[in-house]
Amino acid sequence: MDILLLERLIPEALTWLESRHAVANCPELAADPAGVRAALATAHAAVLPRKVVVTREFLDAAPSLKVLARLHVGTDNTDLEACRERGVRVVQATTANVRSNAEYLLTGLLLLYRRGISAALGDNRHADISLGRELHGSVVGLLGLGPTAHTLALMLNALGAKLIGYDPAVHHTAPIWSRLQIQPVGLFDLMSRADAVSAQVMYASRYRGFVNEQVLSHCRRGQLWVATSRSQLFDAQALADALSDGRIEACIFDGAEAGFASKGTPLHECENLYLTPRLGSHTREARIRASWYVAHRLHEALTAHTAAADDPLSDGLMDLVAP
């Protein structure tokens, strides 16, 4: 077996791969750890869903593995150091979901600004008509300046929103702020000025609990939030307090980790917190982009490995190891 598919590709990309490699298309195996280990024994490449965690033990069961790929972004479920040590290349479709996530955030903002739409869509045709707002002229704070924020900023600028932004990893003098027509501000300034905040921080462990009571104490009252950032970015108790006392009127989070608002947690009773199951990246177009990107990278990696194996002067796969 060349490639083990535990995640579905679009049919066209699957057919393209099958014409070039021996492919085992077994997405149903993803829920069977023992079956995954058995299938990995002879696989040279694997496409894995988010729920399959790559550890050293996982790699022990895959002695022939040269490349593993994911259609999603994020490496918290992958031991990159173990992959480097074993010469396993890690492929991710890092830009395939940028537009779909940006459109999700824009949709969330529009729904929160015009709450009557969601009430009608929820089969409550006779709900009281609530007075909405327009994005045009309102102040939107962008927390995080990753690729998704770039696309979102273009959309919001076209709608006439006033953009302010903060990113702990981007200096306020960086040219990117002016290119995107975002005014860089301090974090507390962003919190006190923004009518709405969109959080798309590229998460790292040092940002755990970054949005805490100290930050949320500066909220402009009645603020609206949308987020595709990891839920670990937020201190749960501080967020619950802000949702309860009116500092945050409502927020929509995509892809919160298990237990984020489960029974017994501070956020469980917050009816103005709306959670969606990673819908941001789930569009037809994003899946097409991700499938073709992964298919081409797998083919390149396996072809390069075969060429290196046939060349006695080659240094092997070191050029394929994930950075």
Image (cartoon, rainbow, N blue to C red):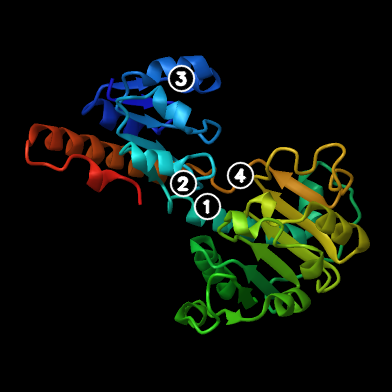
Is 199 left, or right, of 11 in this rendering? right
Mark 2, residues whose alpha carbon is within 10 Å: few (<14), some, or many (≥20)?
A: many
**Which image quadrant for residue 218?**
bottom right
**Which image quadrant for residue 242?**
bottom right
Q: Disc 2 and disc 3: Cα gap in Å?
A: 26 Å
Tag 2 near tag 1, CB within 8 Å? yes
In terms of sequence position, does the residue under pointer 4 or pointer 2 come before the other? 4
Q: Disc 2 and disc 1: Cα gap in Å?
A: 6 Å
Which residue type carries mark 2? Ala
Tag 4 near tag 3, CB within 8 Å? no
Disc nearest the viewer among 1 and 3 = 3
Which residue type carries mark 4? Leu
Please state which of residues 248 and 91 is positioned toward the viewer in this rendering. 91
Q: Disc 4 and disc 3: Cα gap in Å?
A: 26 Å
Q: Disc 1 and disc 3: Cα gap in Å?
A: 30 Å
Tag 4 near tag 2, CB within 8 Å? no
Tag 4 near tag 1, CB within 8 Å? no
Residue 45 vertical placement versus 248 (above, below): above
Q: Residue at x 37, y 35 (%)?
A: 68
Residue 290 percent location from the top left of the image: 41, 44
- The residue singled out by tag 1 in the image is 100
> Which label belongs to residue 286?
2
Residue 147 percent location from the top left of the image: 48, 62
Mark 4, residues whose alpha carbon is within 10 Å: few (<14), some, or many (≥20)?
A: some
Q: Secondary structure at mark 3?
A: helix
- The residue singled out by tag 4 in the image is 279
Disc nearest the viewer among 4 and 3 = 3
- The residue singled out by tag 3 in the image is 36
